[in-house]
Amino acid sequence: VSGLHIVKPYIPELLKRLRMNFSTRAAKQAIDKRDLNILSLLTAHVEDAATCDSLLQLLLPILIAKSQRNASEEVVTQVITTLANLIKQLDAPEAYLRKLAPLFEQTQEVNARKLLCQLVTDIARKRHKQATQSNDEALLAQATRLQRTARLTNMLNAWDKRWVEQPDYDKRLDALKEIAQLVNAEQNGVDIELGVLVIYNCVYFIKYDKDMGLRDNASEHLRLLLPRLAQRFAVSAEDKPNVDYLVGDVAINLLRRLLRDNNDNVRYEGIRLLGELARQAPTTHAVLQDLAPLGDQQDAEVD
């Protein structure tokens, strides 16, 4: 406590120095464990929302990119801890859900995935507390959706309490079933934040999970969810930014990685997903529009 009392006045200057260290290093250079450890410790004591937001905008792309280059579990855990420290101090932490979503595809370590799930839960909890205090109906509706997002994200990453590091496949499959029902719901269906979290989790299952049943279910739900969401947002001109993000930023980049994967099964799933998007949502992206004439929903032989 006395050490923190001495250091606290200098935290802004220390953060500036660390931010400079991260931003000036070469893109391929490994992340410095010492700097990252200091950063994770310091950010636990930063309370100013504006400082947290500016740090996140600068550090998040660097930390996420560098943490995935053969990083150790310790480094990945420190990265997520740092992000959690900063995000939880924001007035509207849910704004960062889209930027956190890719970590659910990239992060394989059990403890790190648990930290990610906890962060999503904390974001939903903070928004619910704010909504309850304000008694604003719009905020309460948003908070309810975020709580559902957090619950389903945790279910998709559920672990069996009886066995160490053994996935709870029943809960994970139940989550996918509930998500499929939401996709087909006319109202209160899957919003874009829940959608991208599900998409990245499904891709993670396809690439890394050992259970064939979960992989098959994840593939089926991905081919159901992504085209359906793209179609829904393509209806309104107001939703064009969501379409550009969902299809251009998320789907096309995911497809590139799937099609370049060394695993034949993963590449095959990428081709199947590309086919579904080209057949069902061709107007949402120029690439899909070019491929649409090659598809045929009525006759698989000529598709």
Image: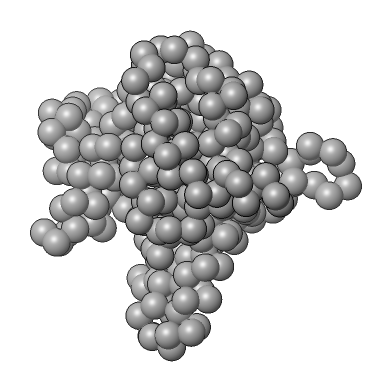
- Residue drawn at point x = 28 percent, y = 31 percent: 252
Of 241 and 280, nearer the camera is 241
- Residue 165, percent from left and from top: 79, 37
- Residue drawn at point x = 84 percent, y = 38 percent: 164
- Number of numbered markers: 0
Q: Is residue 292 found left or right of 171 in the rendered image?
A: left
> Which colouring convention does the figure follow?
one colour
- Residue 219, percent from left and from top: 49, 37
The image quadrant of residue 70 is top right
Residue most extreme to the bottom: 135
- Residue drawn at point x = 38 percent, y = 51 percent: 51
Residue most extreme to the right: 162
Q: Is residue 130 above or below residue 278?
A: below
Of 50 and 104, nearer the camera is 50
- Residue 40, percent from left and from top: 57, 39
The image quadrant of residue 134 is bottom left
| Residue 300 in sight in this render | no
- Residue 139, percent from left and from top: 39, 77
Of 293 and 178, nearer the camera is 178
Q: Is residue 168 above or below residue 48?
A: above
Q: Is residue 105 found left or right of 23 in the rendered image?
A: right
Q: Is residue 271 above or below residue 216?
A: above
| Residue 186 in sight in this render | yes
- Residue drawn at point x = 43 percent, y = 88 percent: 135
Image quarter where the C terminus lies is: top left
